[in-house]
Amino acid sequence: MATSTGKQLATTAKRPTLREINEGLRDELEMVRNDHERLAEALSNAVMMLRQEDIGWAGGDLGADYRGLGLEELKKWSNDIRASLTGSSDGKKAPNPHMRNGLMLRHSFIWDGGMHYEGIPEKSQGRRSVDELINSGINHRLVFSPPARRRREHALYADGIYLLVGDNRKKTLRPVPLHEITDTYRDPIYEDEIIAYRWTRNEVEFDGRGKVLNDGQRQSKSYWVYVDWYDGVQPSKIIYKGQAEPVLKGHTAFDMHANRPDGQAFGSPDAIAAVVWARIIRDLIMNGVKMQDALAMFAFKATAKNKAGQQTQALELGKAHDAGSAATLAGDADLVPLNSAGKGYDFASIGFVVSTMAASLHVPGIALSANTALAGSSYGAAKTLDLPNRMAMQTRRQEHVEFDKRLLAWLGAKDATPYFNNYDDATDEYRSVQAAYLAWQSGTLSPEGFRNELEIIYGRKFLGPIPTGVLLPNNKKSLPRKDIDTDSASDATPTSTPSPNQGRADGTGGAGHANDLPAAES
């Protein structure tokens, strides 16, 4: 009886019933349907992400009335870009090396040599000098020092806006982070002109005697600050969503927008195009790492003609071996190296994508990737900017110059001139100086004109006045100079007295002159 039951079970195992077959097909169909849904959802998410990248997370179709990014869209981009620079607060997202390197390169190229000021007025009696306001105190720490310059470029790189608020009485400046800008007030006629910013900050409240209120708990307070160029009447309060909010009349806002097109109130962060390619590069690198691990997993293929040989191989290859060991296998077994043995993944193929990201940041691809093996790489290319990138950096420099002009005028230096050193390399600079010198030698330039040409070439002002007594080349007034041409017969051919021993082999000059001719006998 038991034997009969065992045979029946064996038969059932070998030949499944029609019901079991249908259930198996139904399960497989359900798996295929689930996979299809997952793929469709993934594709939909990818398409949605690409659309969001194209329109800057603004949502919807661009249409024919696109007004650019708004304040909320800027904040979304800022969060994403800043997380790629510093990592996420929950530790799940690490910093992106290409994004960080792009920021460092842009700051280094733009602020190379620092910004210089000319025409700063001297200290006036009873007031702090502009030079003191720039180079000391809170202004130097938050606005004019090298770390502050880097934070300014960081804001333009990640936020697309850099905002300062100045105290008109104390002449102190303070940066306002993007998350504290909660709205804007536009010009009633020109909607792309921002004339005031809503500044919301968390601050501790005090009573009239300076006592801390609410146990020192910070409360959210909002103020409105008008920009420096606005010359209209500033009200005491602005009605915002039914609430009257104060205007800081004793303060002035200075705004700087990155990549702001005409007709739009805001621009866009420098890294807005680069962050998309940084993600692609990250994915390509991680895929390459997986392929590298797969290529390194198996180096040889072991073959055997029978089961006994396979068992011998398993015992032999299962032992611990050091590098360079020999495997003892059966006579019909063999080890055949795989074609992928010793090979690695072609990470150089990612270079084109890195170059695309570098183009979006206007930096050299070799500098962004720190890979000297990229096509077209050289020592010179790693150190310098090509002409298009140099012009892009020069454009940003001009924007910084105009921004600092506004700051200096507010500080009291209305006639001051900010400037950077020129980008020209040594070769270009040398050729420019040669051209200016040829013009000077032609006699068509005054000393003031020649000095002005040199200051333009070198990108800096020369200290001190022009020395007195400069000779004008190719000029008749420079010829009769008694302090130089003291000999009245200056055009005569100079003469000299020959040595009395000239032509005689008398040993003058030392012994051992075997080729000297003997003196003639008298």
Image (tube, grey):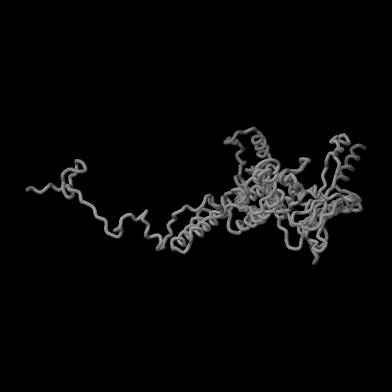
Q: Nearer the viewer, residue 210 or 227?
A: 210
> Percent position (x, y) of residue 119?
61, 51
Answer left or right for 81 relative to 105.
right
Which residue appears at 48% of the width and 62% of the height? 445
Q: Quadrant of the N terminus?
A: top right
Answer left or right for 346 relative to 208.
left
273 lies above or below 85: below
2 lies above or below 175: above
> Percent position (x, y) of residue 69?
78, 57
Can residue 55 be seen?
no
> Percent position (x, y) of residue 292?
65, 46
**Residue at the front extreme, as displayed:** 125
Q: How many marks?
A: 0
Q: Nearer the viewer, residue 473 or 8?
A: 473
Can residue 493 be seen?
yes
**Residue at the bottom extreme, as displayed:** 64
Q: Nearer the viewer, residue 520 or 478?
A: 478
Answer left or right for 446 relative to 94.
left
Which residue appears at 52% of the width and 58% of the height? 453
> Percent position (x, y) of residue 356?
66, 56
**Residue at the left extreme, as displayed:** 522
